[in-house]
Amino acid sequence: MAMEKNFDAAAAEARIYASWQDAGAFKAGANASRAETFTIMIPPPNVTGVLHMGHAFNNTLQDILIRWKRMQGFDTLWQPGQDHAGIATQMVVERQLAEAGNEGRKELGRERFLEKVWEWKEKSGDTIIEQTKRLGASCDWSRNRFTMDEGFHDAVLKVFVDMYNKDLIYKGNRLVNWDPKFETAISDLEVENIEVDGHMWHFKYPLADGETYEYIEKDEDGNVTLRETRDYIAIATTRPETMLGDGAVAVHPSDDRYAPIVGKMVHLPLCDRLIPIITDEYPDPDFGSGAVKITGAHDFNDYAVAKRNDIPMYPLMDTRGHMVDADIVPAAYRKMDRFVCRKAVIADINALGLMTHVEDKKIMQPFGDRSKVVIEPMLTDQWYVDTKQIVQPAIDAVRNGDVKIIPESDRKVYFHWLENIEPWCISRQLWWGHQIPVWYDDAGNEYCAASEEEAIAMAGGKSLRRDPDVLDTWFSSGLWPIGTLGWPENTPELQKYFPTDVLITGFDIIFFWVARMMMMQLAVVDKIPFHTVYVHALVRDERGKKMSKSTGNVIDPLEMIDEFGADAVRFTLAAMGRDLKLSKARLTGYRNFGTKLWNAARFAEMNDCKPGGFNPETATQTVNKWIISETVRALNTTNKSLENYRFSDAAMGLYAHVWGKVCDWYVEFAKPLLQSDDAAVVAETRATMAWAIDQCLMLLHPIMPFITEQLWGDIAPRQKMLIHTDWPELPDTLIDTDADREMNWVIALIESIRSVRVEMRVPAGAKIPMIQLQLDAAGQAALKGNTLLIHRLARLLDISLADSAPKDAVTITVEGGTFCLPLADIIDLGAEKARLAKAIDKLGKEVGGLKGKLSNDRFLAKAPPQVVAEQRTRLIAVEEDILRIKVAQENLEKMT
RNA sequence: GGGCGUAUAGCUCAGUGGGAGAGCACUUCGUUGACAUCGAAGGGGUCACUGGUUCAAUCCCAGUUACGCCCACCA
């Protein structure tokens, strides 16, 4: 069997993935050889979603950990699933219906619309699963769950009922963030405050009955700066249309300007209504006029003021943000859209001569994160989780270390939010979702139960109607860890895999999801949902911009997989570290890395390097002992990096090992050994080569599963697929420091020779002689043991001995010795002089620094002895090197 | 307004209280029996600025500047 020249990722990936699945390789507990479990819950993507780079990144990290632990023999479970994503999905389906020219949601009615959503879910729900598979994700798909599965649904309702019964969930009439596009309440987290260009309109509200007062403004020193008689109070607003719902004008109690008129009434323009001037701590005397119109039903601050002062609140708008058709709104404005109404109000205030001026102003405006329309505070009945009652355990668990958040800085973000938590509005006026399990009788009494039958029974057989609202999607995803494992049944899986080990997620859902899972799991089963939360950054484009469809800078992971292969995409994502700027150049580089590995394996195959039965302890050749040592180091680095979630360290460490050590040096070193006359040397080197490459495949498998699995099978018949092969366990006793030192010396010598050759413009193909001038015992041993390698890699003709350098020779210094290359015909004296001068200069600076330190008494007195010794040793080495170069310089002088 | 974070080579980023690193890009050379998706050799950095702690600071501390992000009800 001859290996292809390249790994044809496109052809191989699907086949390899299928072979894993056919073998049940991903199943919970597959390949388990120990009792310890390792569990990860996938952050469930939207069921109608498509895979984007964020998913690709997130899933890659999870898969790396799962594959690593699975190979180590842990009883692993990577639990996959999808979220029903209430608003997002309802939005998608509504858009689909509209595009297809079908009846809309309202025309269809709730039941038929939900049928459409389920149809859509069945049709498109597998898309993201198939896409996730292309990435190589080794989830246990046989356990795939959906947040609206029957069992999951039951769990969600049970939690609601339990929390309702414990008064952790209540219904309240208060101001909520209302999305006029989707016509539903949303939670604080779903509101994005964005700074926009806006205006501040300054109005006059006339005092009732034509009353006047003396308005006096003073500066900081108490000097009067303005004194006039006014028959009005000045107010300012960014939202003039809300004035129709004003219930009062508030001023600060300490504000002397308005003291004369506190308690008096003003005539609300455009409305036939008198409203009082009240005092409250809320108005800031230094801002605007210091007087604030109070619209309790349409502003969160005003709501609080109105509550405190018992000011009536007048809801002005309907669910779509249109002015209501009711007495509170003057006839002219009824049914108007809120923004149309704003213009009309401004025009009419102007016409009345009550507008003093308009100010251009940057204002913060709330937008729905999905709908992108301006959020309207609305007074409605909604269901709330009384988060303050359940938040403390979630704070404590992180505070006391039961749950680790990585990186640490995100702990602060987590604490800050939880310590200032507000009640969580969980009802949505949507149709797609878990319908709230509360029924009402005609008198309006509530019956909360897991089923209609129970509710009716509770109501004594009365006929009931169910609350039409559904739950916030995050209420159900907050139960993801226990819900997917079969809670409330005490399933074997729940007992075994819960609490889970690590949650890998983006920082953008720390509040939405992580914090809520913590609160919910602790509230429901009194256990933490996971031991560790690894929070990663957002994937950005190469200029650091957030990828978004509207910016048009989205890099589609599937296209990247098509172009570069899943392994390259995975390696790139793993290697990028915490900050994620994605570029094709890196993808190309890591695709090339796969090819490099492939070619190293081809080399091994061509040279009859067959794995099996090799015990690295038995290696005798220094070169082989050296690569074994390096392999142990690579293993240790990989383990340590992955244990600490240092994915990029793991990836880059393996890159450096495979390319920089195995391919650049070991393969080259092995070539002469493989041609040795000594059959034992050939056999050992073949075995070591095969072993070293096998180790690379095993270590790389979690990051690059496809190419490594393919090579694993191609190289030899195997007992098990690579995915289930035991992760290497190599003792540190295999690290041979003598071999290490020797090979590093050899490498340094070869590099020096090569460097001189290039600088002296020796033709790359030319073989040249080298003269050994002086060499210590260690050097002699290293040289003797590796003559063949040095000859070949430095392209030497021979090595001879001499006491002094001949004319026209270039000196090479290495630790413990001096060599020279006689280059009579080619040497460029000027270039050589410059080279030596440069080397001396560099070393001279270092000597200066070292001597400075070592002659400093305070350094000698206070620095640790070990550091002092180090510096001394180093000084000696550098000085020796300088000496050797000086000899070379003298030689050169003699020649000229 | 509050909080958090970042500043190291042209680019993207590692890193450590004691000799400044990697990948990519760049320059020169190369049909070396695995690999041109490659090889060899190079150039390139006041480690943002200022001050402090220390025998010693790119690293620790304080401040400054710039950028990024999160949270927040200034009408």
Image (spheres, rainbow, N blue to C red):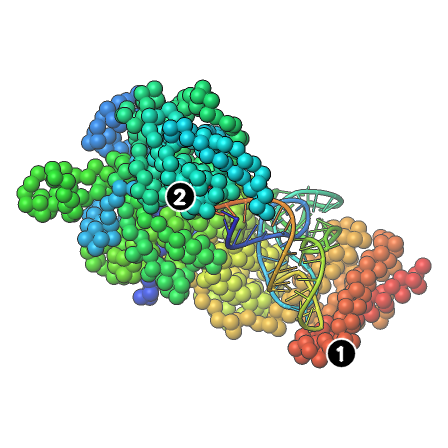
Above or below, A151 relative to A751: above
Graded by Cα atoms within 10 Å as few (under 14), some (14 to 19) or many (20 or more), the crowding at tag 2 reads many
Answer yes or no: are tags 2 and 1 on the same subunit: yes
Q: Horizontally, is A620 left or right of A110 in the view? A: right
* Above-or-below relation of A248 to A816: above
Q: Which chain carries label 1?
A: A
Q: Which of A130 and A43 is in front in this view?
A: A43
Q: Can residue A826 be seen in this view?
A: yes
Q: Where is residue A153 in the image (x, y as percent from the top left)?
A: 22, 46
**Horizontal and vertical percent for residue A535?**
44, 53
Q: Circle 1: is it few (<14), some (14-19), or many (20+) Cα within 10 Å?
A: few
**Based on the displayed image, in which of its 4 quarters is residue A627 positioned?**
bottom right
Q: What element carries label 1?
A: helix
Residue A332's label in the rendered image is none
- Give the residue at x 60% y 72%: A737
The residue where tag 2 is placed is A279
Q: Is residue A759 left or right of residue A630?
A: right
Q: Which of A775 and A797 is in front in this view?
A: A775
Q: Let me know if residue A27 appears in the view.
A: no
**Residue A756 in the image: above or below residue A591:** below
Please, what is the three-letter code of the amino acid marked with disc 2?
Answer: Thr
- Write the residue at 8% across / 38% down: A463
- Residue A116: x and y in percent read 25, 30
Give the chain letter at badge 2.
A
Q: Picture coordinates of residue A475 (x, y %)?
A: 29, 47
The residue singled out by tag 1 in the image is: A857
Q: Identify the residue at horizontal 55%, vertical 70% (top origin).
A: A735
Amino acid type, mark 1: Asp
**Contact between labelled residues 1 and 2, with CB atoms less than 8 Å apart:** no
